[in-house]
Image (tube, coloured by chain):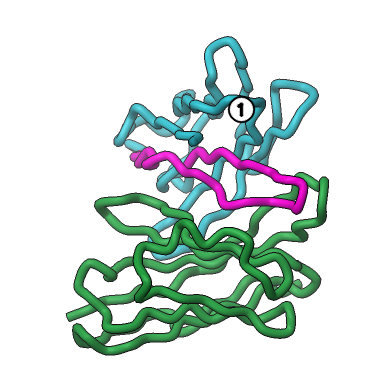
Chain colours: A cyan, B green
Amino acid sequence: AQSVTQPDIHITVSEGASLELRCNYSYGATPYLFWYVQSPGQGLQLLLKYFSGDTLVQGIKGFEAEFKRSQSSFNLRKPSVHWSDAAEYFCAVGLYSGGGADGLTFGKGTHLIIQP
Amino acid sequence: GAGVSQSPSNKVTEKGKDVELRCDPISGHTALYWYRQSLGQGLEFLIYFQGNSAPDKSGLPSDRFSAERTGGSVSTLTIQRTQQEDSAVYLCASSYGLAGERDTQYFGPGTRLTVL
């Protein structure tokens, strides 16, 4: 079964500083990878996704992520964070069978705190 | 267009009572998913529907949990004889779920269930 590890439970970053959130996955084949963000009391919003092709993917709100097969990683980055980026971030792996999408496997999440 | 909607947004119930949670997917989405988000377990996949059928029920925690979908649209997650450990946020997502397509799940705001 696939699994997703987000090693950092909490990360504190100063506003304007760069950000990297780590995600490692365990899966026997090439996974389909996602980053979602959840603000307090809100549902999950998709930031970006990787299916195939270019290993550096661009998402919304200035985020990007790089798929590294050799490291089984899909780390999320942003060059300069804003106070509004404070939220919970989830990395997820998808398995797609011939019948379409299956349930996603999520990491435990990383809580991002922005210092003024 | 309208996103995934869920009702009620909050539900407080007494232990032993049955509850029904409702999900309205995005129009045109054939696949629908239920997840549970709790402090101890993080985000867990429960069940997904392709049309009205549920190919994968392996994520349902116990036989007290059931789900149905009618008309390829609205879905209801039912929890019978609720227990305190059922307290969580129940999230619904939908996607196009076309065979061979690698599509994206869009999430609703969730239903917060509290079992007293």
Q: Residue A67 occupies which quadrant of the picture?
A: top right
Q: Position of residue B105 (x, y in %)?
A: 65, 55
Image quarter of the C terminus of chain A: top left
Give the residue drawn at x 65%, y 40%: A48
Q: Is residue B17 in view from this perspective?
A: yes
Q: Is residue A19 in view from this perspective?
A: no
Does the magenta segment cover residue A104? yes
B18 w.r.t. B52: above or below: below
A55 w.r.t. B1: above or below: above
Give the residue drawn at x 38%, y 38%: A110
Q: How many marks?
A: 1
Q: Which residues are magenta?
A: A90-113
Residue position marked by numbered label 1 in the rendering = A65
To which chain does the residue with label 1 belong?
A
Q: Residue A33 occupies which quadrant of the picture?
A: top right
Kind of residue at badge 1:
Ala
Q: Position of residue B49 (x, y in %)?
A: 64, 66
Q: Position of residue A108 (x, y in %)?
A: 37, 41
Is A67 situated left or right of B77 in this image? right
Chief SS of the magenta region: strand
